[in-house]
Structures are given as structure tokens and as C-alpha cells.
């Protein structure tokens, strides 16, 4: 049948649906931001040594830093800033899917609500840190404030995930889950420790004009990014052991008189789901 041939055909021909593989979602959510961040830092170190040589500590104009801070690598200097923005554009849709749906594996209650809220604030904090850079119109302190919001939300997510897995006994029924539970505790402890070191050495570097202190601060910043990626990678990989991905399926508009009980039966809405998939139902 040609494209311009007019013939009767059913409409819609099929139910619109697509499958989102869990492996790709894990990559975009957990690993892409960290890998992009390290790419921006590495490319600055290798290709733009002149940019770093012109960077000095805020309170010490005569002191040069041997390492680029993350805030400048992804938020100020180009083309690294553009690379980071592109990565964030890929990260956020996948992040929204998992933030909305992953907490639903737990029973309704306060814990699930806290996890959803913390994960949402973490994503929002990342966006604000990216938009309101150190040289934006609202200044460095606002940028630092949004970073603190992101950091608190991240720690909040880590803590509630570990707590929920302890409460439901998941770690007690699966040796792999038990090992990964302790791995997540170790990552969370390391995340808190290097964050504390960063908060100590940054003011020291500014008050004493110490290159060593600022170098340690930069290394702690780099570690925070990697540890955040490692935690989400471990947790979402566990989720991926149970689900292959998400199937997004349009749900046809219910027809009939709802008061007479002629609405589409709920079981019909899941007719197009695949084994081992989580289903996202989108109202058509």
C-alpha cells in the first residue's frame, strides 16, 4: 500500500509503547555525570594549562592552583561547560524516570516518601549548581549554598536507602544483598569523610594561601563526585537484578459511563507489559 493510497485502516494501529533498558538508565543516572566531570577536569589539565595557570585562589591573587576546581571546570571554562550541559541534558530524563519509580519498590509509608523527596531535591540541587555557577549574577555564595543542598540530599538518599534495606530484611535473605549493603555503608562513610575534609581544607587554603590545602580540597571534590556515582551505581545495579527496564505504554482513554461500571478493566491496562519489566502507564 502506497503512502498516498487512501484505504480504511484501524486507528490507532497499535498501542504506542517503548522499552527503556535498565542498563542504559543506570549509565545515564549514575555514571555519565561523573565520567563527564572527570573528562572536563582531565581535558582542562591536558589541553588548557594556560587557563589553569591564570587561575588563582579567591583571597590570594598571587597564589596559583595546580588543579582546577570542579566548579570552574564544568561551570565556567569552555568548551568543558558545554560538554557538561550536554551530559546533564541526557542525565535528567533518566533521573526523572528512576526518581519517580524506584522508591515504589518499597511499601507505602514515610520511608518511601522520604526517599522520593531526597532524590528529587538531589536532582534539583544538581541543576541549580549547574545553572548558578560561581560567576553567575547571584555569586559564589549562592552557588555554594546549592552545592550544600545537593550534598545534604545525597547523604539523605544514602542514609534512607541503607535504612530501608535494613528494615525490610533484604540484606538478610540474599548474601549478595548483604555484601552490597556493607559496600553502601562504606561508600556513605567515605563520602561523608572526604566531604568533611573538603569543608576543612577550603577555608584553610583561603585563609593561609596554602597551595597544599587547596590541592587537597580539589582532590576531595573529585572523590565526592566518584563516591556519589559509585553509590548510585551499586544501588541501581541491585534494582537491575530484579527488573530489565521500564516499559512505557500509552493507556487508552476509558470509555463508557463510569457510574454504570463500564470502564476499561484494570487488567487490560497491563496487557502489553513484558515479563521482568516495570510498567510506566501514560494516560493517552
Image (cartoon, helix red, strand yellow):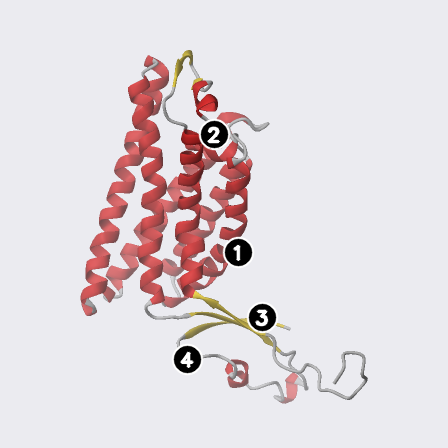
Q: Is residue 162 above or below residue 192?
A: below
Q: In the rendered structure, are the residues bearing label 3 and label 4 in contact, judged by CB atoms less than 8 Å apart? A: no
Q: Tell me the CA gap for discs 4 and 2.
A: 46 Å
Does 192 appear above or below 238?
Answer: above
The N terminus lies in quadrant: bottom right
Point out the tag, 2 or 3, that comes first from the N-terminus: 2
- Residue position marked by numbered label 4 in the rendering: 275
Could you tell me if residue 24 is visible in this image? Answer: yes
Find out whether the residues at labels 4 and 2 contact each other: C-beta distance under 8 Å: no
Residue receiving disc 1 = 93
Q: Is residue 192 positioned above or below 31 on the image?
A: above
Q: Which x, y percent locates residue 69? A: 41, 29
User: Badge 4, how many Cα within 10 Å: few under 14, some, many 20+?
Assistant: few
Which residue is disc 3 drawn over?
282
Q: Position of residue 10 (x, y in %)?
A: 71, 86
In the depicted view, which residue is nearer to us: 67 or 103? 67
Residue 258, quarter of picture: bottom right
Q: Earlier in the sequence, mark 2 or mark 1?
A: 2
Amino acid at each position: 500500500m502506497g503512502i498516498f493510497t487512501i484505504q480504511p485502516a484501524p486507528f490507532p494501529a497499535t498501542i504506542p509503547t517503548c522499552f527503556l533498558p535498565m542498563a542504559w538508565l543506570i549509565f545515564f543516572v549514575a555514571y555519565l555525570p561523573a565520567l563527564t566531570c572527570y573528562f572536563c577536569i582531565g581535558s582542562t589539565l591536558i589541553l588548557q594549562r594556560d587557563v589553569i595557570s591564570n587561575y588563582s585562589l579567591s583571597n590570594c591573587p598571587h597564589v596559583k592552583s595546580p588543579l582546577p576546581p570542579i566548579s570552574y571546570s564544568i561551570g565556567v571554562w569552555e568548551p568543558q561547560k558545554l560538554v557538561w550541559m550536554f551530559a546533564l541534558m541526557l542525565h535528567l530524563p533518566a533521573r526523572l524516570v528512576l526518581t519517580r519509580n524506584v522508591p515504589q519498590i518499597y511499601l507505602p509509608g514515610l520511608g518511601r516518601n522520604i526517599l522520593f523527596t531526597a532524590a528529587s531535591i538531589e536532582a534539583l540541587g544538581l541543576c541549580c549548581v549547574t545553572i548558578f555557577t560561581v560567576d553567575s549574577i547571584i555569586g559564589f555564595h549562592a552557588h555554594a549554598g546549592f552545592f550544600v543542598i545537593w550534598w545534604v540530599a545525597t547523604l539523605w538518599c544514602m542514609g534512607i536507602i541503607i535504612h530501608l534495606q535494613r528494615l525490610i530484611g533484604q540484606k538478610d535473605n540474599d548474601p549478595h544483598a548483604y555484601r552490597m549493603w556493607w559496600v553502601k555503608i562504606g561508600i556513605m562513610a567515605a563520602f561523608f569523610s572526604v566531604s568533611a575534609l573538603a569543608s576543612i581544607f577550603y577555608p584553610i587554603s583561603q585563609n593561609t594561601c596554602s597551595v597544599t590545602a587547596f590541592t587537597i580540597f580539589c582532590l576531595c571534590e573529585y572523590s565526592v563526585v566518584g563516591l556519589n556515582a559509585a553509590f548510585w551505581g551499586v544501588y541501581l545495579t541491585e534494582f537491575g537484578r530484579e527488573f530489565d527496564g521500564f516499559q512505557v505504554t500509552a493507556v487508552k482513554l476509558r470509555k463508557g459511563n463510569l457510574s454504570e461500571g463500564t470502564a476499561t478493566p484494570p487488567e487490560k491496562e497491563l496487557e502489553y507489559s513484558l515479563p521482568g519489566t516495570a510498567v510506566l502507564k501514560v494516560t493517552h
